[in-house]
Image (tube, rainbow, N blue to C red):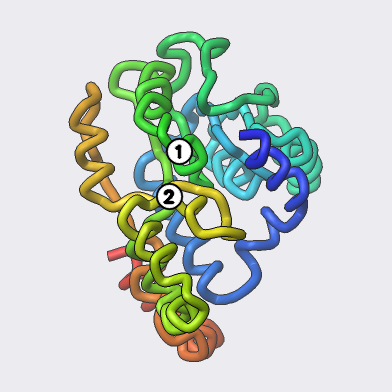
Amino acid sequence: MDEVRQLFDELGEGEWDRFDKNALSRVSLELHRRFLHRHVPEGARVLEIGAGPGRFTVQLAKMGCQVVVSDISPVQLALNEQRVTDAGWEAAVVERRLLDIRDLSSVPDAGFDTVVAYGGPLSYAFEQAETCLGELLRVVRPGGQVVASVMDVIGTLRIFVRAIPSYAANGRLEDLKQVMATGDNRLDEGAHPCRMFRWSEIEAMTRRHPCVVLGASASNFLSSGDQEVVAYIEQDEALWDLLLDWEEE
């Protein structure tokens, strides 16, 4: 976890910028935003886990939510305060806390209407992901919501399918096979350290907890294809809105 903390400390502003780097990223941002509107009640008291520099803190504030912002990275927490203040929504932040998703013992039971854990905090919990999900459920009130994202092993392969020949040519195909079999990206030397999931694993994990799955989405399912075409579509407002609607559907 020290490696994950250091990664996001060093990433700094890059965690904000990643949603602006191309059309694919902007589709992802919009899908995450729409999912919040679908599942987070306006005016909710929200615990935001892994809030980063505040992309979704601002969105929650615009929905009238009162937000306890948390992150494992002190650098990201400082950036969150800067970005949210600059956007004019600091009044929506109740407090900021340095929190590791693996240890929410300082957070009381049923203290929140909703937990938002975007950016894949459960993927950074690795083998402890299911225990962490139980903790997220513990801190929401009965009938409350946990809105979380994880990295997806099949979707990731779909985006990076062009890399398969290079893995084979460099004698690293067995590494890729291990990552695909386990979802553990740490097995690929030099890769971004995270655990990627299949939907069947998410279903199985949620069945073992006192909760009901209200909705699910594979962000960028349509838009992870030809990036030149996606970028072209973005220049036409009507086509862009159509693509986003189809992506959401």
* Residue drawn at point x = 61 percent, y = 59 percent: 190
In the displayed structure image, the side of residue 83 where residue 177 appears, left or right: left
- Provide residue 71's location: percent of width, then percent of height: 64, 33
- Tell which residue pokes out farthest to the front in this image: 171
In the image, taking residue 57 as reference, residue 139 lies left or right, namely: left
80 displayed left or right of 246? right
Q: Residue at x 38, y 29 (%)?
A: 133
* Other residues around mark 1 within 10 Å, as few (<14) / some (14–19) / many (≥20): many
Q: Which residue is mark 2?
A: 184
The x and y percentages for residue 175 are 43, 63
Q: Which residue is mark 1?
A: 126
Q: Nearer the viewer, residue 31 or 241?
A: 31
Label 1 vs label 2: CA separation? 8 Å
Instruction: Check disc 2 and give the amino acid type.
Output: Asp
Name the foreground residue: 191 vs 115: 191
Q: Nearer the viewer, residue 38 or 170?
A: 170
Could you say which quadrant of the image residue 72 lies in? top right
For the residue labelled by badge 1, is the local secondary structure a helix, a strand or a loop? helix
